[in-house]
Amino acid sequence: MASKEPFMQRHHFLLRRLHSFTGVFPIGVFLIVHLTTNASIVWGRLGVATEKSHGGVATFQHEVEFIHSLPALLLIEIFGLWLPIAFHSILGVYYATTGKSNIKHYRYQDNWRYTMQRISGYIGVLFIFYHVATLRWGWTWLPFASGFNFREASSTTAIALRGGSEEIGFGAVVIGLFYLVGVLMLVFHFANGLWTAAITWGVTITEQAQRRWGYVCAGLGFGLAGLALAALVGFVTLDIDEAREYERARIIELESAAAPDQQAGQLENALARH
Amino acid sequence: MVSPASHNGSNNGSGAPARSRTVRFRIQRCEGPAKPSRWEEFDVPVEAGAGANVISCLQLIAANPVTVDGKRTTPVVWDSGCLEEVCGSCTMVINGRVRQSCSCLIDNDAPNDGDVVTLQPMSKFPVVRDLWVDRARMFDSLRKIKAWVPIDGLHDQGAGPRERPKTQQTRYVHSTCMSCGCCLEACPQYKLEEDPDDWDTAFIGAAAIGQVRLFNKHETGAELAGERLDALMGPGGVTDCGNAQNCVKVCPKEIPLTEAIADMGRAVALHGLKKFFRGK
């Protein structure tokens, strides 16, 4: 009889709890790491940049190179990020459709959070898809899209955030706002999700415990939002020519270290990509 | 946070309610199950300090069912029992918010001449007629989670286990649940299910989850703890809660429903883990 139940009902508990778990690990943890890395680009404007960090460009490049040096990166991405995100998104949208917001009659703060958690989820899914499709999969045929090259991490990111242009024009406004809204929605979704996950798993039971954990989650949320805003401002105001200068020097440095005799030919290839 | 009582009227800073005044009742009416609904309005004279509540006004309307247009209509039907907010049967949606109509005092909620009180049946249960709904699903939910202490048998079972005062304190407030349905009406995850076949998989709601806490924390009631948690782990169980936390705010008995939900979330997590490693 049990086997006649639909899949979703038979594994109801496991799926629900996996949905909750994947939101925190790996997705939430990755969000923290990702936003922290991105924020290094703003160092130059905060005065914390050193000679070696080139206004954050070198630090960001260093972080990106570290990520690209990881063994079996594609497998890490597929099983550590894309599949968990797809799982969390698909189930999340399905679960969200089982509820019906009644914020009109019950205007409590918690009820707003409930509604916002679902709205931020929907927007977040669209944002992550565009973000990964353009910058990771290179789907540059999407509107205002340009690709990402990990050897020129800062300059290509800055161009992508300006809607595929080096100038700050219409595309920059559209994509800049899209990133602003998308990232803030995801930060809210994570902070609020971390708060409700503690209820789901029964970590915070009493009202007092829930309130205390709420302060922690709100603090984390504002902190992450600050990092996200810093990164956005940093990339949108980045001096692309200066960033390229560092990136080209870095390419030469790497290739001369790898094969000193072929240096000239490879350097030409690298520069020809521009 | 919005104070629930200050929704539509409450003393507008003008102090005491107007002495002799007319309050308009806007009532959503329905002839019977699956019939279309319509609105009718009635003017009811109210004396300040006389303790008028929604029920007493409905009684006046029943005595003279004439709408504001002068049209004679049928008396409005409603359900009520104790008239002191302990039976839950007169629960309805008043000015957009679910509560008991017996404890909705007109002097508080419609203090001025011409104030409007809107009455609707709860939307999460099938309407029997007018403001009267069928809450059978709530009692089916209590059956699903075995909301009783198993002491069947005619033989002497001896003294029961000792109840600890601290646990008893936690349990007491849950025992005041009167299955009125406020928590379910205000819940964005709880939906109207007309077909009893769907009751088993649709979200069970806060009331029943609170009852699992009540009975699982009872020393003898805990005999069925595993079975209750099994019911809460399945489709429609505690996992379907969306943490909007409206339930705890509309509960007239101030039952800590969100604490019960978190507590049961912990219980099913441990129960699920144990089951996984122990097997069936």
Image: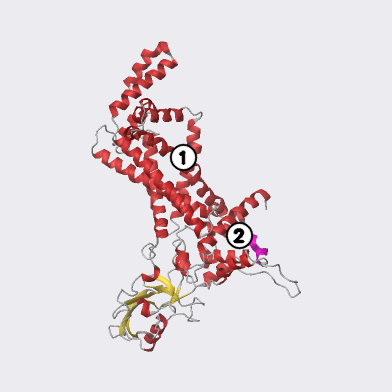
Instruction: Please state the horizontal and vertical placement of residue A186, each as a whole percent of the image.
Output: 40, 46
- For residue A38: magenta? no
Q: Chain of mark 1?
A: A
Instruction: Please state the horizontal and vertical placement of residue B251, each as a whole percent of the image.
Output: 47, 69
At 33% across and 39% down in the image, what residue appears? A232
- B241 displayed left or right of B115: right
Q: Residue furthest top?
A: A261
At 49% across and 73% down in the image, what residue appears? B180
B136 and A209: which one is in front? A209
Vertical order, A169 against A212 (above or below): above
Instruction: Please state the horizontal and vertical placement of residue B161, each as a whole percent of the image.
Output: 71, 67
At 31% across and 34% down in the image, what residue appears? A45
Q: Residue furthest bottom?
A: B63
At 50% across and 49% down in the image, what residue appears? A19
Magenta span of residues:
B221-228
- A148 displayed left or right of A168: right
Q: Which mark is residue A187?
A: none
Q: Which residue is mark 2?
A: B229
- For residue B225: magenta? yes
Query: What kind of secondary structure does the magenta stretch mostly adopt?
Result: helix
Quadrant of the image for the C terminus of chain A? top left
The local crowd at label 2, few if under 14, some if 14 to 19, many if 20 or more residues have their Cα within 10 Å, is many
Q: Which of pointers 1 and 2 indicates the residue nearer the eye?
A: 1
Q: Which residue is mark 1?
A: A30
- A234 displayed left or right of B221: left
Q: Name which quarter of the figure residue B176 lies in.
A: bottom right
A234 and B64: which one is in front? A234
Q: Chain of mark 2?
A: B
Instruction: Please state the horizontal and vertical placement of residue A129, each as a whole percent of the image.
Output: 39, 41
Q: Evaluate whether residue B33 shows in this view.
A: no
Secondary structure at badge 1 equals: helix
- Amino acid found under the numbered disc labelled 2: Leu
